[in-house]
Amino acid sequence: MADVMALKPGVGGQAAPNYLTASRGLKSWLFTLDHKRIGVMYLASVLAAFLIGGVFAMLIRMELLTPGPTLMSAEAYNKAFTLHGVVMIFLFIIPSIPAALGNFALPLMLGAKDVAFPRLNLASYWLYLAGALMGVVAMVSGGIDTGWTFYTPYSSSTGGAVSLMTLAAFVLGFSSIFTGINFIATIHKLRAPGMTWFRMPLFAWSMYATAIIQILATPVIGITLLLLVMERVFNVGIFDPKLGGDPVLFQHFFWFYSHPAVYIMILPGMAVISEVIPCFSKKPIFGYKAVAYSSVAIALVSFLVWGHHMYVSGQTPVASAIFSFLTFLVAIPSAVKVFNWLATMYRGSISFQAPMLYAIAFLLLFAIGGLTGIVLGTLSVDVHLHDTYFVVAHFHYVMMGGTVIAFLAGLHYWWPKMFGRMYSEKWARISAALVFVGFNLTFFAQFLVGSRGMPRRYYNYLEEFQPLHIVSTVGSWVLAAGFFLMAGYLYASLRKPIDAPANPWGATGLEWQTSSPPSVHNFDHVPVVTTEAYAYATETEETTVGAR
Amino acid sequence: MRDWLRSILLPAEGTSYAGSVDSLFFFLFYMGVFFFLLIAGLLTYFLIRYRRRGPDDRTPYIVKNHKLEVVWTLIPLSLVIFIFFWGFHTYMDAAVSPGDAMEIRVTARKWVWEFEYPNGIRSLNELHVPLNKPVKLLMTSEDVIHSFYVPTFRIKQDVLPNTYTQLWFTAKEPGMHRLFCAEYCGTSHSDMLGRIFVDDEKTYNEWLETGGDEGKDMPLAEFGAMLFKSRGCNTCHTIDGTRGEGPSFRGVFGSQVKLQDGSTVLADENYIRESILRPQAKIVAGYQPIMPTFEGMLREREINALVEFIKAQR
Ligand SMILES: [Cu+2]
Ligand SMILES: [Cu+2]
C-alpha cells in the first residue's frame, strides 16, 4: 500500500504535503493516529476481504451450476459457503462503511481534526488485523463447516478450526466496538462550532445509530462465541444437549446480536445514500428529522425482533407472534426513508455521475429487499420460506443490493477526496451497469428457487432447479466482471498525478471545503457552520446549480 | 392467472392449509409488485423529468410536508398490521393440531428420517399417510438440529435433539410429496431427502400390513440399488470407490476387511448382513462408529436386496 500511496505530489511538485505524502514508510502507516490513514488502511483491508469472500462466492456458484458434484466435494462446499459468509460479514460488510469510509469522512464532515480517541481508533484497526489473521489461520488449518451462524449442537460437535474462527469473530467484535465508541464520542464532542445536532449531515446520525448497536449488541455475540469455545474446549454444557445444554438458547443469543447486526450493516448504507442523493439532485434532503429519527428508531427496535429468525425453531407461537409484530414495525422507518429520498429528487436537478448511479441502484434493490422482508416477516408465509433460497436472495438484496451498493456509492463519492484523483467516469458507468445487471441475474433467480422449495446450504439439488441455478451462476460471472473493471479504473486513477478539485461534485458538506486530499490536520481554519446541512437551495436566496 | 403464477412461484398445493398460505403469499406478492412499481415508476419519472439541464438550473426549497409524511407512514403501517394479523391467523391454524390426529413418531439423525407408525411398523425416508386424515408428527433428533420441510404442504419445523417438536397436516393430494431437511446438518444435509406417499385409506392400510409391494417385480440387485438411495445409505457410502463418512461399497464383497480391533474378517454375505443390522458389532478400521442400526427397519427382502446390491459392486 505504501508504494501506491507515496504518490507524486500535486501539480509541479509544489503543493503542500497532504495526509498521504506527509510522511513515508510502512511504519508511518501502521502507527499512524490519523483517522484518514486508518480509514485508508481499513479500506485496503476490507477490499482484500471482499476479494477473498468473492472468490468463495464464485466457487459456490460454480459448484451449483449442476446438481451433484461439479467442482468440489460436499465437505469442501460446506466450508466454502461458511467461509464466504464469515469473511463477507465479519471482515467486509460490518467494517466496510463505518470503519473504512466513516473513519475517513466522519471527522471531516463534522469539521473535526480527528476522531475523539485516535489511539483507540488505531487499536481498532490492529484488532481487525489480528482477527483477520486468526481467521486466515483458521481457514488454512482445517477450515470450518458450520455456516456463518455457528448453530449448536452442530458447531459444538463438528471438526475443524471452529474455536479459532469463533475467537477471530470475538476479536473482530472488539474492533467494531472500538469504532462505535469513537464515533459516539466524536459526534458528541467534536462537532465544529455552529454545527448543532440538527445541522449535522445525516451520515453522522446514521453512524451514531450504528454505533449504539455496535456497542450494545456486539458484547452479546462475544460472550456467546466464548461460551461456544468453552463448550468445545472444556466440555462445559451450555448449548449441547449431550452435555445438558440447550441448543435453541444459542440461537436466541446469536440472533440477539445478529439481527441488530443487520442494521450495523444497513444503517451505514442508508447514511451514504442520504449524502449522495441530495448532492446529485442539488436539493436539500426532504424530511431531515424524519430520516434522522428513523435511524435511531431502527437502532432501538432492532433489538427486539431477533425471534423472527426462529419461527420454526420450537419457540412458542406467542413469542413468534410478538417478534413478527415488532418486525413489521421496524419496517416502517425504512420505508419512510425511501419515500424521503424519492421526495428529495422531486424537482431536483439530477445528474448521473457514478455515485448517483449506485444510489439509484440502491433504491431499486433495497426496495426489493425490503418488500421481500415483509413477506418473510409474515408468520405463516415464513414457515414455508424459512431456510430456503428465498431467504438467501432476500438478504443478498438487502446486504449486497443495499449495503455493498451503498458502499460503492460512497467509495465513488469520496474517492476524489481520499486520493485526490478522479476515476474514469465512463468506465465507472459501464462497471455500475455490469454490477447492477449481474447482481439481479444472480439473486433474482434465487427468489424463485426458494419460493419453489429448495432449501439453502444444499450441495446437491433436484434437477428441476437447474435452469435457475444456471442463470444465477452466469449472473455471478457478470458481477465479477463488473468488479474487476472497477478495480482496474480505480487503480488506474491512483497512478495519475493529483487532479481532483476540492469539491468535484459541488457538495455542501464540510469535507468538501478542504483540499483533495486533505492536509494532515484536515482544515487550515476551524470551519464554522451557519446553515443547515444540504443547503443546496435555501428558503431565502436563489442559487443556480452551477454556482456550487 | 393465479394458477399460472403459482406454477412459476410456488410448488403444488398438497393440503388445504397450503391454499390458505398461498392466498396470503399472493396478497403479499401483488402488494410488493405494486409498491415496487410505485417506487420504480416515481424514480424513473423523476430521473427523466428532473435531469440536469444545465448550470442554470434552480432547485426549490422543499423540505417538509407533514400531511404527506403522515400519509406515507400510516398507509404502510396499517398495511403491515393487517398482514401481521392475517399471517398470525394462518400460523395458528398450523400450530394447533386436531385432537383426533393420527400420531407418527419421527426420528431424525444424520442423514436419515425414521418413521414409526401407531402399530409399531417403522420405515426409513418414506412416510406413508392416509388421504384426508389429519396426521400429527412427534419429532426428535438423535444428533444435531434438522428441519422437517414439505414444500407442497407449506410446513416446516425444526427437529431438536433435546425436545419433542410437532407438526400436523391433512394431505388432500394423493401421490408423492417431497420431504427436505431444511436445517444445515453437515456433509449430506442436501441428501437428507424423503418422500411422503399419500394413499387412500385402503392402500394405506395394505401398506401398513405388508409394507407395500415396492420392488416386487424387480430383480434383487436392482431393488437394492433403489434402496441404497431411498434408505439413505448413499449419504455415507459411495459405490465409486471414494471414501465418504463410511467405506465405499466398491470391491468390499469378498475382500478381507481390517477392523478397528486389529483383526480382519472376510466380507461374506453374513458379514454384510451383520454390518447392516448391527453395525457396531464390527467396526471397520479408520472409521467412526456412526452408522445407525437398521435392525427392525428393513424387511427381509430389503436386506437381501441390499446384500445383493453390495455384492454386485466389484
Ligand atoms: Cu433479523
Ligand atoms: Cu440437514
Image (tube, coloured by chain):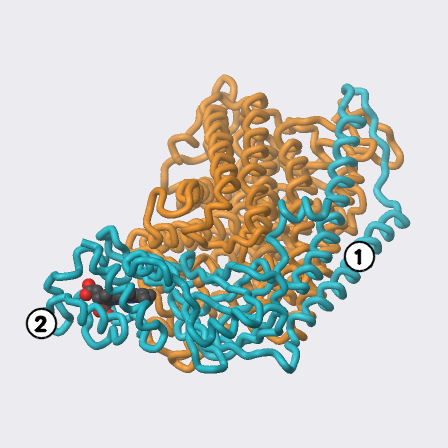
Chain colours: A orange, B cyan
Mark 1 neighbour density, 10 Å: few (under 14) some (14–19) many (20 or more): few
**Of the numbered discs in the image, which one, if any, rests on residue B79?**
1
Give the residue at x 58% y 51%.
Answer: A452
| Secondary structure category for the residue under label 2 | loop
Quadrant of the drawing holding the C terminus of chain A:
top right
Residue B219 pos. (x, y %): 30, 58
Q: Residue furthest top?
A: A12
Q: Out of A487 and A157, give the one closest to the viewer.
A: A157
Rendered residue at 41%/51% (across/down)? A459
Using the image as rendered, state which of residue A400 and residue A426 is in the foreground: A400
**Looking at the image, which is closer to me, B78 or B291?**
B291
Q: Position of residue B76 (x, y in %)?
A: 79, 54
Kindly identify the amino acid type of the residue bearing the numbered disc 2: Ser
Answer with mark 2 or mark 1, whichever residue precedes in sequence: 1
Residue situated furthest front in the rendering: B217
Name the residue rendered at 28%, 58% in the picture.
B221
Q: On what subunit does the disc labeled 1 rest?
A: B
Mark 1 vs ligand 1: CB below 8 Å: no
**Between B8 and B231, the one nearer to me in the picture:** B231
Q: Quadrant of residue A64?
A: top left
Q: Residues within 10 Å of mark 2 (few under 14, many from 20)?
A: few
Q: Which residue is mark 2?
A: B263
